[in-house]
Amino acid sequence: MKKIKPLAFYLPQYHPVPENDEWWGKGFTEWTNVSKAQPLFEGHEQPIFPADLGYYDLRVPEVREQQAQMAKDYGVHGFIFYHYWFGSGKQLLERVANDVLKSGKPDFPFCFCWANETWSGIWHGLSEKILAEQTYPDEQDLIAHFEYLLPFFKDERYIKVDNKPLFIIYDPNHLNEGDPHYISKFRALAIENGFDGLYVMASNKLSDDLDFQSMGYDSKISNAFHKAWVPHINKKEYISHSQYYKNRIKGLIGIKKKEQPKVRIQDAQQVVNDLKFEESNVPTYPCILPNWDNTPRSGYRGIILANNSPELFEKQVEKAAKYLEDKKDYPEQFLIVKSWNEWAEGNILEPDRKNGFGYLNALKKILNKHSRNE
């Protein structure tokens, strides 16, 4: 049996860029939202605080080395860097990957997920504002995109499947509508440059029921977690007992009651219990989420997966590992973790002050158990 290879999504938005300075204020990074977060109801655990790595700046090589070493120590096989190419040569947040390529460090596997979606201000209270529009202008831009990626593909650290660079597409529908031949053209360019093709994987964004094979995909990331979660998401009004009686008194004496904001929330135990990985019409790799609370980024528009714990994450890893046991025909045993460091979504494997290395220890424990069983 092939070894399970966990790949963790990796967000590069931990250094200032001119565009974010313009949109959100000088010096903005993901930490800006994380550090200013406030609890939105009684018992809401915000803000969250990084532990061992602190409020890092990804321009610092030592930070990237520490992340890679930590990931390696706990069984993560590689990082999936988010990659932003908006068309007409427009990129954002490319510095981290460029520095990793140029320096040759850290010595740790990686690949790209092309986050092919338009950036808007919708999650930040600027719903009408388009910040960066995703386009697919022409074949010249497609070639320029491939030529930018080629040095990464050639790097020995870049993750490959049977001499095919692994390339993940975040939104297959958006790409298919914009240019249905993009993947086939990319694959042809890869062959022209000495590879046996591209190993193209669809992200977990879309349902597993779609025909990914006919869209040109070799595999996809399971949508099972989302499928288990969505039916349970509800809106609850979190009001303390004292506030409840104050509101009643105001109502009785004729003062208009102020409507309390609501947060969509779901109990993690129910989601994990319902989590069931199933195949699409291409090899489908399990995807697990350690935690989720994107209210630091989105406020009351956010969604919270409540009552997470390393123990629940351990159950997810176990379900994913057992699913992979029956997939001996898959070229690799990828286990996708979302995410390594999406702090403003409360979606992290990195240690925080509350749980420390709890989630990483849970991952390592189950990986070690299944490696002994091989």
Image: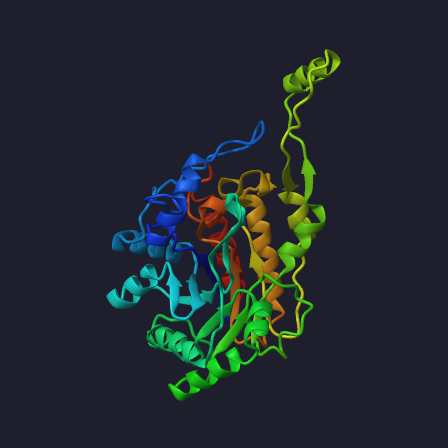
Q: Residue at x 32, y 75 (%)?
A: 151
Please provide percent x and percent y for residue 14.
36, 50
Please provide percent x and percent y for residue 333.
53, 69
* 63 to the left or right of 371: left
* 149 to the left or right of 361: left
Please provide percent x and percent y for residue 155.
33, 74
Q: Please say if 214 is above or below 244.
A: below
Do we see residue 1 in this rendering?
Answer: no
Occupied quadrant, residue 233: top right
How many numbered discs, if any? 0
Q: Residue at x 56, y 44 (%)?
A: 311
Q: Nearer the viewer, residue 304 or 142?
A: 142
Q: Residue at x 49, y 40 (%)?
A: 296
Q: Please say if 225 is above or below 344.
A: below
Occupied quadrant, residue 269: top right
* 257 to the left or right of 48: right
Residue projecting furthest to the front: 128
Q: Please say if 99 is above or below 292.
A: below
